[in-house]
Image (tube, rainbow, N blue to C red):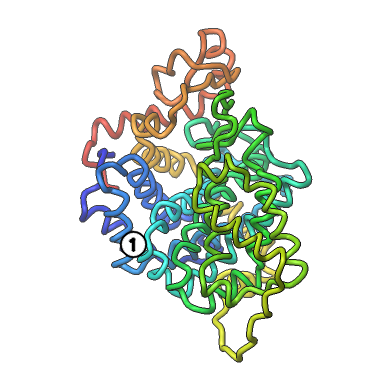
Amino acid sequence: MDSVLLHGEAEGYIQSLEKMSLRDIGSPRWFHQHEYIEKLNMQAILNASANQEEFIKDLFVSLGKIPTLVHSMILTEVWKHKVFPIICKLQDFNPKSTFLLHMVIHHEATIINLLETIMYHKESSEAAGDSVLDLVDYCHRKLTLLAGRSVSGEIPTEDRITHAQMSDTASVQDLQRQSDMLEFEISIKALSVLCYITDHIESLGLSVLSRMLCTHNMPCVLVQLVENCPWNRGTLEKYTEGKWRTVPPEDQLKLSKHDGQVWMALLNLLLKPDCQRKYDFNSFNKTQLLKLRRFLTEVVIDQLPNLLDLRHFLSQLSITDPAAPKKDLILEQIPEIWNNIVTKNSNKWKAIAKYQVTHVFNPSEIELREQASRLAQTYNLDVMENLVPDKPKCGACGRTGAKRCSRCQGEWYCNRECQVKHWPKHKPACKLMAEAIQKLQEEPNISR
């Protein structure tokens, strides 16, 4: 894959994106679409300095494909909740390769990462149309899950699993564990998307405003996140860029990116005039919001001076009782994607799981080789290394890798002993990747 997508190539990828059914997940048509989204996502990340991010955003806006992205993301979310658990319980399911299942599990994360990149811009939120309501609901589901897990102490302690670290011979149960771990990363990304939506909320209509403030009471959800900070382990570790990292003593009082996003979302939802007119500052909400005052220290305000306005507002709120919002008769739009998918497939979850186990997730040798060939094109090794800022880890013991497998170039080891020990497990994936790379070298113009 070239380091920068050409305009026509990126436009072709985006134009080809289409809404699919739950049954289509994992099919060749789905795999091609996943491949295109992965390429667009990697280009937006790697070439932000070359305005590739805005270039891709402009294409999604002009081609009207943001609603398609949102639909695909929620479709995968439903599949993970309704179909994947059934697949995991099937005793006779023992596929030759679990890589395609791994792709489906990561598809939701890939899309939310791409949305995080493009939803920063006001025109993206406006171009999302009615699907922005579905996106608000999606963010609410993820943030309530994040807050709940933080309160119950269920935040994962491991780093996220990347494509490069994924073993092709992982069991279905391993994939289920990885899916649970990935949910934390997805929820963190959903916080970013929600923050960007609140930045532009006044241009998105009353339905979005009402959904966020009245239906979901998002300010109180954000208070829970401020109180529990699920991305911090005390002051010693913080979760950034998919990893738990030790914080130097001099940086322990610094706000992280996620801290800042929560505060900015609260600032937007509580201080913007349209939001203040719509939100009900009843006794419960008022009690919850006033909890924020003990977190608005001078150290925090020095880093985000805008929070001084929030502190003044909360001081005023503590001694007044704002009037309840007017209950005008307004016809509001409601989100449809989740409900439509669930209604259409109700009582069909087991049938879909059995169909996919038989026809999708148990590929033949030929299909495996074709998938490996496309994988070698999509996840160019040099590009993947640029995406991972940390040193590679040994595939056997997890320590820092010193040498790469000379055959497939995709696995790292700290020493010869670990490589020999890991070979029986690595051999099938190594063979497929090596053959795919050789084929690409012999046919450089292979069709995408």
Q: Answer with the quarter of the image where residue 47 lies.
A: top left
Please state which of residues 426 and 274 is positioned toward the viewer in this rendering.
274
Q: Answer with the quarter of the image where residue 359 lies.
A: bottom right
- The three-letter amino acid code for the residue at tag 1 is Phe
Q: Residues within 10 Å of mark 1 (few under 14, many from 20)?
A: many
Query: Left of 298 or right of it: where is 220?
Result: right
Q: Quadrant of the N terminus?
A: top left
Residue drawn 49% across the image and 30% down it: 429
54 relative to 125, above or below: above
Query: Left of 137 or right of it: where is 406?
Result: left
| Numbered disc 1: secondary structure | helix
Residue drawn 30% across the image and 54% down it: 54
Determine the residue located farthest toward the bottom in the rendered image: 329
Q: Is residue 362 visible?
A: no
Q: Where is residue 377 in the image (x, y as percent from the top left)?
A: 33, 39
Q: Position of residue 81 (x, y in %)?
A: 66, 57
Residue drawn 49% across the image and 65% down it: 71
242 relative to 335, above or below: above
Q: Answer with the quarter of the image where residue 403 lies.
A: top left
Please state which of residues 87 and 192 is positioned toward the viewer in this rendering.
192
Q: Is residue 199 visible?
A: yes
Residue drawn 42% across the image and 58% down it: 119
389 relative to 402, above or below: below
In this rendering, the count of numbered labels is 1
Provide the residue designation for mark 1: 60
Q: Where is residue 208 in the image (x, y as percent from the top left)?
A: 53, 73
Q: Where is residue 163 in the image (x, y as percent from the top left)?
A: 49, 36
Please state which of residues 46 and 230 is positioned toward the viewer in this rendering.
230
Query: Left of 199 or right of it: where is 93?
Result: right
